Structure formats: C-alpha cells, structure tokens
Image: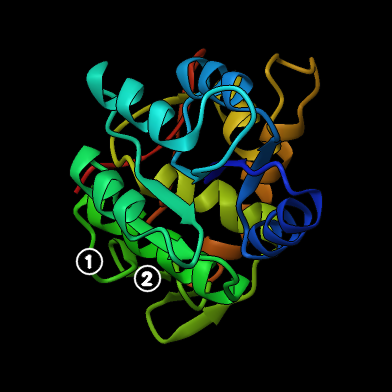
Amino acid sequence: MRVLVAEDEARIASLVGKALEAAGFLVDLSGNGDEALSLAGTVSYDALVLDIMLPGRDGLSILRHLRALGNAVPILLLTARGGLNERVEGLNLGADDYLSKPFYVEELVARLHAIIRRRSGDTTGLLRAGDLLVNLITREVRRGEVRIELTAREFTLLTCLLRAPGRVFTRAQLCEHVWEYHHDPGTNLVDVYIQRLRRKLQDHGETPLIETVRGVGYRVAAP
C-alpha cells in the first residue's frame, strides 16, 4: 500500500515515514501543500496523511480540492491540539479521521489501516483466497493450518494481488505498487518474486493461487 505524508516538520515527517515503512507501506513525503496536491492528483495512493498547517496550500484546501474532483482516497488529518473548528471542518469536508498533535505513531498506523479497510469495504482486516488467509494487522499469512513466513516485499506483492481478485496486474503495475518504480526496470524482478511466492504458498496447498496471464502479467483468480 502506498501513502503520501504531507508534513512540513521534518522530525515528525521522518518518524511517521519510518513507522509506516516498518508497517509495510510505501511512503512519499512532502513538506509543501502545492507539491502534495500535485502528487495526490497524479499518483494512485491508498491513503493520504495531511497536516492542516502546510506551506502553500493547507491541508483543508487540499482535502476540499480532492473531494470536489470526486477523489475518494482515504484522508487522515493532523491537527493542532486545540484546533476543534479545523477538525470539525475537516470531517465536514470529507476527511476520514484525524489525529491531534502530539500523537503516537503506532496509533497513526492503526488508524490508517482502519480507514483504508473501511473505504475498501473490509472491516475485518483479513484477505482471503481459497484456503489462504492474510491478516493485514498482524501480517500473518496462513494456508489452511500452516503459517507461512514471507518477507516484507513478498507480503506487499501478495496483498496487492489479493485486494483485486480477477484483475490482471502487468509487471509494470506491480513494479510501481510494490517497488515504487515508475517504469519497467527491464529485469525479471517481478517474475522472480512471483516464483518465490508460488513456492512458499503452493508448498502448503494443491490449488495454485497466482495465475500467469501470458503476455500480460499475473492475477489471483476471482472466487
């Protein structure tokens, strides 16, 4: 999952970015509201973290603009402790949640997971495909009764496919979602990771979960 964090306080931005990366997110950082709005309009994010007080456009202005365009990306606002009016305005404009400064980064990560699940219609934090079960909160992967250990990159690749059963992802799309490459690197990186995932998953089940669509890419079969 990919997240944009718009925060002009370098220390806070660094802490939030590291916490999100440790939780498996791909993170873009911006310290300017105009740049953040441009990124939000051109990159497909799973969620935005917007500080209300930003140089250039402020967080509420970015929120208002995106919602006016019909962009429903989940948005978490960061507000000053006493900013009640801003919090109310933000929620009325379509923000999904807010946190008052100072805050615990662990809470921010948990709230982001929650608003992403709500927007995707998943209120359990679980992804399923046949006898495969993935817990997005604990990052536990099981096939039947067997627990499967995945690296952070393998986990991100698997959840990317599982979130859209039946959708075929090209290698270029997977490079962007999983490795944050905005171009095809011209290597077999995706194929290598797909084969690793298949070995780990199919060691514990008879039915292949990840299908190859020749000349296009990969998908998890729709139920």
Measure the alpha-carbon separation of dots 1 and 2.
Answer: 15 Å
Provide residue 218's location: percent of width, then percent of height. Answer: 48, 31
> Quick one: 203 or 185, which is closer to the camera?
185
Relative side of 206 to 129, left or right: right
**Given contact means CB atoms under 8 Å apart, are the residues at marks 1 and 2 in contact?**
no
Provide residue 109's location: percent of width, then percent of height. Answer: 53, 66
The answer to whether one can see residue 145 in this image is yes
Q: Is residue 85 above or below residue 169?
A: below
The answer to whether one can see residue 205 in this image is no
Q: Residue at x 60, y 71 (%)?
A: 102
Quadrant housing residue 11 = bottom right
Q: Which mark is residue 133?
A: 2
Of the image marks 1 and 2, the number of the one nearer the N terminus: 1
Q: Residue at x 56, y 42 (%)?
A: 53
Q: Which mark is residue 123?
A: 1
Q: Is residue 17 above or below residue 110?
A: above
Dot 2 amino acid type = Leu
Relative side of 182 to 118, left or right: right
